[in-house]
Amino acid sequence: MIGAEREHKVTVWNETCRVTTYHKHKTVWIAVGTYKGERIETDDSSEGTALKRWKEAAAYRGG
């Protein structure tokens, strides 16, 4: 369902973060969360890959 939000727990460098995903358009999923005080937002064609990109972005910034 487009617009529905789901919350996920994602671990980055031993820190658990809450990331929200939502279906923005037919082929676009957004993942949004905060890591070390910085808001990170990623998008992709599926919920799982949007979350994966979010985790990669957070790890890059925190590493």
Image (cartoon, helix red, strand yellow):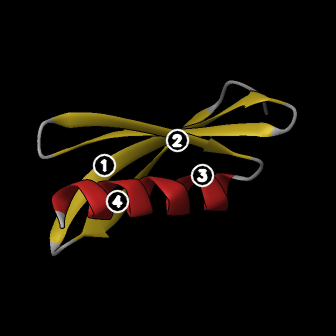
Nearer-the-camera pick, 43 or 21:
43
Count neighbours of disc 1 (C-alpha within 10 A) and say few if under 14, some if 14 to 19, many if 20 or more: some
Q: Amino acid at mark 2?
A: Thr
Q: Residue at x 29, y 64 (%)?
A: 59
> Which of the numbered marks, if any, corresponds to residue 50?
3
- Dot 2 and dot 3 residues touching (CB under 8 Å): yes
**Vertical order, 31 against 11 (above or below):** above
Q: Of helix, strand and loop, which one carries label 4?
A: strand
Q: Amino acid at mark 4?
A: Lys
- Identify the residue position indicated by label 1 in the image: 18
Count neighbours of disc 3 (C-alpha within 10 A) and say few if under 14, some if 14 to 19, many if 20 or more: many
Q: Residue at x 79, y 33 (%)?
A: 1
In percent of width and height, residue 37 lies at: 12, 37
- Dot 1 and dot 2 residues touching (CB under 8 Å): no
> What's the distance in space between the residues labelled 1 and 2, CA to CA?
14 Å
> What's the distance in space between the residues labelled 4 and 2, CA to CA?
16 Å
In percent of width and height, residue 42 lies at: 52, 41
Q: Nearer the viewer, mark 4 or mark 2?
A: 2
> What's the distance in space between the residues labelled 2 and 3, CA to CA?
6 Å
- Dot 4 and dot 1 residues touching (CB under 8 Å): yes
Marks 4 and 2, the one that precedes in the sequence? 4
Q: Residue at x 30, y 61 (%)?
A: 60
Q: Amino acid at mark 1?
A: Arg
- Identify the residue position indicated by label 2 in the image: 42
Q: Of helix, strand and loop, which one carries label 2?
A: strand
Marks 4 and 1, the one that precedes in the sequence? 4
Count neighbours of disc 4 (C-alpha within 10 A) and say few if under 14, some if 14 to 19, many if 20 or more: few
Q: Residue furthest right?
A: 26
- Identify the residue position indicated by label 4 in the image: 9
Marks 2 and 3, the one that precedes in the sequence? 2
Q: Amino acid at mark 3?
A: Ala
> What's the distance in space between the residues labelled 4 and 1, CA to CA?
5 Å
